[in-house]
Image (tube, rainbow, N blue to C red):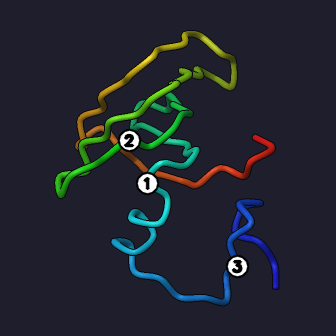
Amino acid sequence: MADAAGTGMSTGVSKTPAEFLKAIKGKAVLVKLNSGVDYRGILACLDGYMNIAMEQTEEYVNGQLKNKYGDAFIRGNNVLYISALSKSS
C-alpha cells in the first residue's frame, strides 16, 4: 500500500481524526495555517478547538525557514491542516 504523503502511515487503515491526533501527539508534525505559513515541530498538545502547543518549532514562509521558536502556541481558527511528518523530514 502507498504511504499517505510520505508519512509512513498506510492509507488502507481507517482512523478517525481524533485517533489520528492522539497517535501523533509527541511526534513531528507540520501545521499549515490559513495564511499559507507552515510550522514544523513536535506536537505537545491540542484541545477541542484545535488550539495547538508545539515544541522545537520552525516557521516556514514560502518554503523558506524564517524563524525558530522553542515553544509555539497556535490558535485553532488559524489552522488549515495538521500533517504527520516522517522521521527524515
* Above-or-below relation of 45 to 71: below
**Disc 1 packing (10 Å; few <14; some 14–19; many ≥20):** some
Residue 21, relative to residue 55: is it above or below?
Answer: below
Q: How many marks?
A: 3
Of badges 2 and 3, nearer the viewer stands 2
Disc 1 designates what residue? 25
Label 3 or label 1, whichever comes before in sequence order: 3
Q: Residue at x 50, y 28 (%)?
A: 37
User: Where does the image place residue 77, in percent across and percent down from the top left?
Assistant: 23, 43
User: Please, which residue is most extreme toward the top here?
Assistant: 67
According to the image, label 3 marks what residue?
10
Expressed as whole percent of the image width and height from the top left, the position of residue 63 reads 69, 25
What residue is shown with label 2? Answer: 44
Residue 44: image location, x then y, percent: 38, 41
The answer to which quarter of the image holds residue 8 is bottom right
Residue type (three-letter) at the residue carrying disc 2: Ala
Q: Are marks 2 and 1 in contact (CB under 8 Å)?
A: yes
Closer-to-camera residue (67/28): 28
Left of 67 or right of it: where is 18? left
How far apart are the alpha carbons under marks 3 and 1? 18 Å
Amino acid on which the number 3 mark rests in the picture: Ser
Q: Nearer the viewer, mark 3 or mark 1?
A: 1
